[in-house]
Image: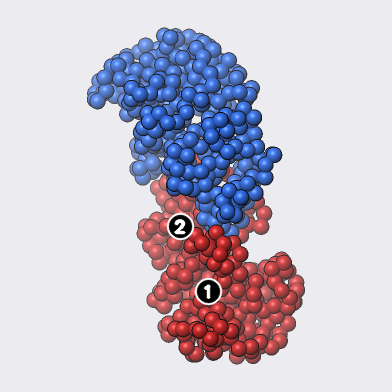
Chain colours: A red, B blue
Amino acid sequence: MKAAYYGGAETITIGESSAAAPGAGEVRIRVSHCGICGTDLHIFHGKMDHRVRLPQVIGHEMSGTIEALGEGVDGWSAGDRVTVRPLDPCGECPACKAGHTHICMKLKFIGIDTPGAMQGLWTVPAHTLHRLPDALSFEQGALIEPLAVACHDVRLSELAPGEFAVVQGGGPIGLLIALVARAAGGRVLISELNPFRLKLARELGFEAVDPRETDLVACVNERTGGAGADVVFEVSGVAAAAEMMTKLPRTRGRIVVVAIYSQPAPVHLFQFFWRELKLIGARVYEAQDFEKAITLAAEGTLPLERVVTRVLPLEELTEGFREMERGGEAMKILMRCSE
Amino acid sequence: MKAAYYGGAETITIGESSAAAPGAGEVRIRVSHCGICGTDLHIFHGKMDHRVRLPQVIGHEMSGTIEALGEGVDGWSAGDRVTVRPLDPCGECPACKAGHTHICMKLKFIGIDTPGAMQGLWTVPAHTLHRLPDALSFEQGALIEPLAVACHDVRLSELAPGEFAVVQGGGPIGLLIALVARAAGGRVLISELNPFRLKLARELGFEAVDPRETDLVACVNERTGGAGADVVFEVSGVAAAAEMMTKLPRTRGRIVVVAIYSQPAPVHLFQFFWRELKLIGARVYEAQDFEKAITLAAEGTLPLERVVTRVLPLEELTEGFREMERGGEAMKILMRCSE
């Protein structure tokens, strides 16, 4: 079985996947598909070498089949189709003790802090497993992790049916948030710069605008009778969006910050005071978000096949990264890991 | 009866209070005391001339006695001791229709957008009245408005008994927030630069530190077993505090922004993502916050007399502003308006 090793900035080497037997409480999975996340691209660019041990297999958006079980693993069998919630919390820190294990203060993110899924055989703790129903293909299964991010974000937003939501940033996570928000009964407007992503969003039935061409504030006010948006999802991570996000919500509206800002950004705190806005930070997911994502995906109403724009063999991982860098007609790119 | 007229930057003129009969739905109040708010000082400095009609009586933190009633005013009598919730919402805008009349999109703030209480006789809509119990002096009554701000802020913070709160800024509002938070069962740490305010806070039993001398992050972590603060109240409005506020909360902690930022400030949005923090904007108060403030004050356990550092006759309003500007040994300054 193959494995794709990250060996330092811009370097991927194809080697052999470790076939070590799973330890106590672990399972070994035959990985079918693994999606490339923005974080993987960040690692590929050498920006996270302080967290990655070289050479390391990365990747965490996967689907596969259990192939071997370690000692003491109950409730799972070889052949079970699964995806992995790639979080390994310490269980001891104040965040874990308060029940927020998904953002444990010493969280090991599997696929970043420990080896990932871009390989044919992958060994993980059994507590990370979620069952994939037969209704879901392995390609769809590899989308459960980012879909769970979207479910988490929409859940924390407390979006109610009929509410108006703006999604700033129409990449994979933004588009999935839009789909989940719509499934929850929300009316959704997407703000995005990339013409391909705008077009795709429109084909999926969303109103989608380029904020350089459309007066976003006026547009939102027009759609909401002058009230403003109930919820703004900030998924883009750029300073212009951090400025815009406070101009869109209604009185007591909510802003969910999903994007990762590497630098402090100027924020119009006055607007929080003036309109009593709420800003809610949202990171990864909890077990219930994975279950929700699986249920939603299995219902078959989300056009997940449109989110995947390319499927490549594992050997072409570098090409996958290059396609993401080009930023043209790419949305989610999946790697086939065990053919 | 006298009145203090603001006539443009740095100019206060003493003249006569209007004695016009109250119109339908209005009452005329004989004002006893009126506190100077930071906003009044801002007006005095000429920073809000776009909202004030010159010459105008300002002031909105008051106590007094009903002296005359207009047509159709039920439930009130001449002689009733009252304070005023100085908000006059439109009732028609999306915010009002959603029940958030206190932050009406066309809110008239009485004492800024319409004439205020720095005069012997003051006419206001009867819907703004709250009854002062006999247990409260008129000096204490003039503190109900800022105390209601504090009650609103603590309510929106959802502070639970035993939780740890940091108050950034130990001026009148910060100190009142600290008192209300402590009364709600919170453990409170105050961060403040002014030595007089630090000393006063300590005399009132709070731990109070100068963040230039004490490592605030280390201090908060030490007090909370490494978890971080449950709630941070940002009352100071300075960029250094906007930077600090994201470093103090625990995982899923809350930051309540009470301060008025005139400019966008750099905010470490990454921290919101990383620890799933919440930021909550809080402005003025709702009726229930006034009732809570009156109940709390009437219980007699809050050391409100220590919050008032000076009481001056109305003619000396300019001196009151000057004392606030000096920023030395001042906390809340009250004016006697009808002697």
Quadrant placement of the N terminus of chain B = top left
Q: Quadrant of residue B122?
A: top left
Crowding at dot 1, Cα within 10 Å, few <14 / some 14-19 / many 20+, comes out as many
Can residue A328 be seen in this snapshot?
Answer: no
2 vs 1, front mark: 1
Residue appearing at x 56%, y 30% in the figure? B203
Question: Which residue, given by chain and number where applicable, does mark 1 sit on?
Answer: A85
Residue appearing at x 65%, y 71% in the figure? A113
Looking at the image, residue B214 lies above or below residue A259: above
N-terminal of the two: label 2 or label 1? Answer: 1
Which amino acid does the dot numbered 1 rest on?
A: Arg
Check the residue under mark 1 and report the chain it is in. Answer: A
Callouts 2 and 1 in the same chain: yes
Looking at the image, residue A223 lies above or below residue B142: below
Looking at the image, residue B261 lies above or below residue A209: above
Q: In which quarter of the image is residue B106?
A: top left
Check the residue under mark 2 and report the chain it is in. Answer: A
Question: Which residue, given by chain and number where applicable, does mark 2 sit on?
Answer: A157
- Percent from the top left, x then y, of residue B60? 45, 24
Quadrant placement of the C terminus of chain B = top left
- Percent from the top left, x then y, of residue A76? 47, 85
- Percent from the top left, x then y, of residue B144? 42, 28
Which amino acid does the dot numbered 2 rest on?
A: Ser
For label 2, the SS is: helix
- Percent from the top left, x then y, of residue B262? 59, 36
Residue appearing at x 70%, y 80% in the figure? A5
- How many labels sit on residues? 2
- Alpha-carbon span between mark 2 and mark 1: 21 Å
* Horizontal arrangement in the rendering, residue B239 relative to residue B284 (left or right): right
Crowding at dot 2, Cα within 10 Å, few <14 / some 14-19 / many 20+, comes out as many
- Depth check: A74 or A323 in front? A74
